Image: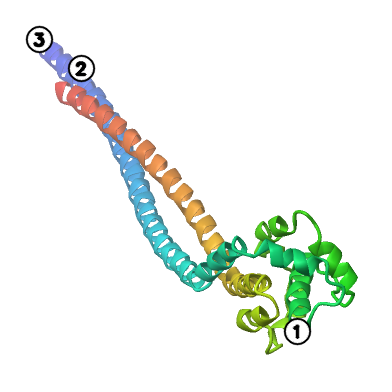
Amino acid sequence: KLEQTFSEVALMKEELSSKQKELEIKNLKASQKLSEMASEQQKAQITREEAIKLFEQVNIQSEKIIVKSNDIKDELSQVEPAMEEAKESLSVIDRGKLNEIKVMYNPNQLIRLAISSVFELITGGCSENWKTVKSFLNRDDFINIVRNYKTENITPERRLTMNKFLENEKYTPEMIARGSTACSPLVKWVRAHLSYFDILIKIDPLRLELSNLEIERETKEKQAKDLQSKINELEAKIEEYKKKLNKFFIKLNEN
């Protein structure tokens, strides 16, 4: 009977040892899963902080864009009313008086100054030969050409050559009107385009900066969205770890 007892004790020790090893393995697995989950949580936290910083940068970029956009609007507001007024004045040009100029072989200095400025601005050609200027003026679509002209067509070189008109003290709508009231609106129109061009040149760096800001914002927005997707994936992974660990601990306690 004593031998049987010893045998039973030995068997119990062996079973206990086996249980302890099994428990150690399960504890090790649990520890590994906890470590993996902690690692994923740390990744999620770091990614979340990066995303927050990016969203803050996006907000800063948006504020800068608003400021630059307003700067551009402010600059354009200085010349846009004059441009609109100049365009409207074209519609009230006395066609009869304009037709009179079209048949002139030797117009007065003020008329020639006005028509030459329109010719040079639109064509970029030399206005020394009145016959050349006159052929341009005689076009049936002359007023439409003038009305549809875009300031963006002016080159820096052409703008520079137009200074000879602006520097002439007689080159004002009021003075030109003394030569012909039909030419006064044309001078107003030319001066408006040149002023508008000067503003476009001035705001060109602002527009470039605005474009760069918008590109940078779009890039950061995409990065932030990508990070948010990564966060969602990590959080889903963490939840899966939690479920597995919960099941694991339930089984562990049952044993």
- Where disc 1 sits, the SS reads helix
| Front residue of this view, candidates 25 and 253 | 253
Q: Quadrant of the N terminus?
A: top left
Depicted 142 relative to depicted 190: above or below? above
Crowd class of label 3 (few under 14; some 14 to 19; many from 20; radius 10 Å): few
Q: Residue at x 20, y 22 (%)?
A: 251
- Where disc 3 sits, the SS reads loop
Q: Residue at x 58, y 68 (%)?
A: 86
Q: Is residue 154 left or right of residue 215?
A: right
For marks 2 and 1, give the CA distance. Answer: 115 Å
Question: Where is residue 134 drawn, in percent x and y?
Answer: 84, 67
Residue topped by disc 1: 164
For marks 1 and 3, give the CA distance. Answer: 130 Å
Residue topped by disc 3: 1
Dot 3 or dot 2: first in sequence order is: 3
Question: Of discs 3 and 2, which sits in the foreground?
Answer: 2
Q: Is residue 148 left or right of residue 248?
A: right
Question: Where is residue 190 drawn, in percent x and y?
Answer: 67, 72
Number of the label disc, if any, that sits on residue 11: 2
Q: Is residue 196 left or right of residue 37?
A: right
